[in-house]
Amino acid sequence: MRMWMASVGVVDNDELTLMALSGYLAGHFGEKAVLWKCTSGRKAISLCMDNASRPDILLLDMSLSDMSGVAVCRELRSRLGTMPILAITSFPLDQYAASVAEAGGQGIVAKRNLMQIGRALLTVAREGVWADGALSESERSAFERVSVAHARLEGAGLSSPVALSEQEEMIMSLFAKGLGNGEVAERMGISENTVKTYVRRAMAKLGAKTRSQAMAEWISRKLDISM
């Protein structure tokens, strides 16, 4: 067992995964390594904003039941200039890497590799960021240290939504007109896989778990702007 003085808050929507992560960290770093664990993004925000329950590092799943992990990350980083956030996911890392970096996270690692998660936590605690070798050079270089990310995002929490890119806006607009993936791809001159990538990024920025939720949030924002 490698002793470690930092405390970790663990957030994952799956109870079994939560137990496995917590058990590994406790066994590898000591029983006091895990300060708390929960399945809710909103509860995690509440715990992290309380000085008494704020962990040294937050281990944050990207797929939560009440809100997206990216939204949790952005809300916390906009309000906190401390506490590194390490994202975890069972999906390919490049699906979330850019959104996590933009939201102020310090790295992302595959959920299935417990040993890698342990190394990533140590690296973030020591060096500030985790640049996973599975990512491209541009994706790895996008992650910022806590102080830099906080300075960029300060005050831009849930009350100040993340802007979609031009391509993401266009795709959402075409979906609103009733077009499907294939029709959108043909209209924009891109592949369907590229359309899906833009949709995933838009969903993450909008804090949505499904495309329908993303559309509803996007339309709501448009209505707010027009009023």
Image: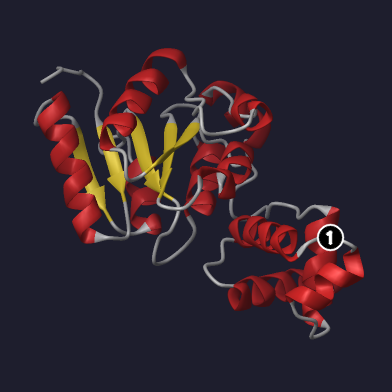
The location of residue 141, given as percent across then percent down, is 63, 24
Q: Residues within 10 Å of mark 1 (few under 14, many from 20)?
A: few
What is the quadrant of residue 203 in the picture?
bottom right
The amino acid type, in three-letter code, at marker 1 is Ile
| Residue found farthest to the top | 126
> Is any part of residue 11 visible from this angle?
yes
Name the residue rendered at 28%, 60% in the picture.
14
- Give the left or right position of residue 42, taking residue 199 as reference: left
Above or below residue 206? Residue 125 is above
The location of residue 98, given as percent across then percent down, is 63, 41
The quarter in which the C terminus is drawn is: bottom right
The quarter in which the N terminus is drawn is: top left
- Indicate the secondary structure of the residue bearing disc 1: loop
Name the residue rendered at 71%, 74% in the picture.
220
- Give the left or right position of residue 84, taking residue 206 as reference: left
Name the residue rendered at 72%, 70% in the picture.
218
Name the residue rendered at 13%, 33% in the picture.
26
User: Which residue corresponds to mark 1?
Assistant: 190
What is the quadrant of residue 224 in the picture?
bottom right
Of 111 and 155, the residue lying toward us:
111
Of 60 and 50, the residue lying toward us:
60
The location of residue 151, given as percent across then percent down, is 63, 27
Of 27 and 116, the residue lying toward us:
116
